Image (tube, coloured by chain):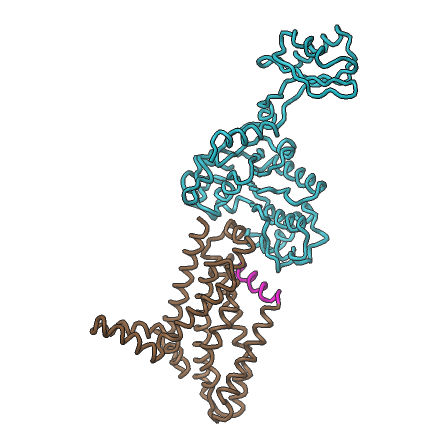
Chain colours: A cyan, B brown
Amino acid sequence: MIKVENLVKKFGPKTAVDDVSFTVEPGEILGFLGPNGAGKSTTMRMVTGFIPPTAGTVSVGGHDILDNPVEAKKAMGYLPESAPSYPDMTVLGFLRFAAEIRGLAGAEKNKAIDRVVELCFLENVIHQSVDTLSKGYRHRTCFAQSIVHDPDILVMDEPTDGLDPNQKREIRQLIRRMGEKKAIIFSTHILEEVEAVCSRAMIIDRGKVVANGTPSELSSKSELAGSVTLKVRGTGAGAIRSSLDKIDLVSKTTTVEEKDDVAWVRAFPKDQPKNGEVSAAVAETAAKENWSVVEVYTERGRLDEVFWNLTISETEEQPK
Amino acid sequence: MGNIKTIAKRELNAYFASPVAYVFIVIFLLLTGFFTFMIGRFLEANEASLNAFFMWHPWLYLFLVPAAGMRLWSEEHRQGTLELLMTMPITPWQAIVGKFAASWLFLGVALCLTFPMYITVNYLGDPDNGVIIGGYIGSFLMAGAYLAVTCLTSALTRNQVIAFIVSVVICLLLILAGWPPVTEFVNGIVDSLAPNATWIVSMVSSFSVMTHFEDFQRGVVDPRHVLFFLSVIGFSLFSTSVVLKSKRS
């Protein structure tokens, strides 16, 4: 379990991390989201004990990272952002070193190495030296190092960076599988990754937590969430909108696009309507008006829009 | 202890995985041979001792030890592996000692490979082998002191060239501290400022590796000299840990 309380990191006059608190329980995967330079890596470096915090506490598996660093680090695996490894070592040599320093020896060590080599698809390069590897392999070698001792707690800084789409998929599945029992923190700026992997997501901007919740909770904060989009052939957008505006549940309508005889209109709900209420009303109107409907769907909200609103608008509010 | 061994093993393997180790050993042996025979005139001196061999060590080490040690920490900074190393369940002290021990052991291997000198002098004459062993012990300790200084400069920068140059300068100061012109220079300053403080002069010259190494060359393993080299090593490694800590925050 990871428990972070009121974490602050200052580099000179600049505050990189400003009062961040969170906990991650076993079975939970926490996704860190945020623009570059938001303080994601700095937070992770403090959690893993690489840099000391200016203020606040970090406890990993019940051990304070400052008072009892060795015990805390034993319980943890860490994949740094740049996925470093010793270039003059072979993949096998590097994994052996990582396993030994984690206290594994003999048959247990070999079993652990075999396991991570298989999990991270490193069979083909195991005897190659790290500096001859492609970026994807190098990344996976460092990933393998972080899980060789099967830690209860995993901290991964952009684990899918530099991988091809297939490898990204494999690594995501691996993280999700491991997340069933472990407490995992990982950072990314790929939003689909958050929806695919995380049980909880935190958006960080300029050192502060600006949103915290399940991916669906976060995306429901989007303005689009709950709006109904309707595509109709043969009727003008203006006519459709004036009909839809008469529905009680609808607050406003917009024209998304009008092209090739197809009008694309979006109806926004008033307040927080019950599931399906608005789309039912829109469908009813469409039937009454005898529109030839091509498509109708309810938006569940988009994480990218929430992300954009939370991280961009604030920057504009406080110009430097 | 196990962690120190693991770190040292990795470091030692790193030496031999690259050409560095072989180039270093070959150059070291060639240079010791050249200085002993060509400049030290070992054969012409007609002496059954290795004085002509050991007298060059402070100067050879001046360039070779920083070359062997300059990558110790600067490379960890540059490759980003410092982040990996410092988040593993080891103390920074274990990492520092492990890496230093590996390099020192490597220098020891290079020094041991000069054994043909020992055989030659024993074949040609009847030397006092106690004196020779004393010389070897002193030489090894001196290499350790230079190496610890290099360790410290290497922790300060990610640039190996800077680490090399700064350690050469510091080691040179350690050599020159007891050199008569330097002693006279310090004496002159002390005389004009505080005429009674001659202890400053003796303190400066006591930092010279030359004075400490000379006794070893005579076959005297004086605990005070051993303590000198060990305290240079201890102080430098401690400073390394302070530097690494401040670099991370």
- Above-or-below relation of B223 to A100: below
- Above-or-below relation of B48 to B169: below
- Across and down, in percent, residue B172 comes to 42, 72
- Across and down, in percent, residue A51 comes to 46, 47
Number of numbered discs overlaid on the protein picture: 0
- Quarter of the figure with residue A186: top right
- Above-or-below relation of A187 to B24: above
Q: Give the range drawn in magenta.
A: B5-18
- Above-or-below relation of A268 to B203: above
- Across and down, in percent, residue A60 comes to 49, 40
Magenta segment main secondary structure: helix
Residue A211 falls within the magenta-colored stretch? no
Q: Which residue is drawn at 49% across and 29% down?
A: A317
- Across and down, in percent, residue B178 comes to 35, 77
Q: Which of B62 and A47 is in front in this view?
A: B62
Q: Residue at x 52, y 87 (%)?
A: B38
In this picture, residue A255 sits left or right of residue A188: right
Q: Which of B60 and A74 is in front in this view?
A: B60
In this picture, residue B106 sits left or right of residue B181: right
- Quarter of the figure with residue B120: bottom right
Q: Residue at x 40, y 68 (%)?
A: B230
Which residue lies most toward the left here? Answer: B196
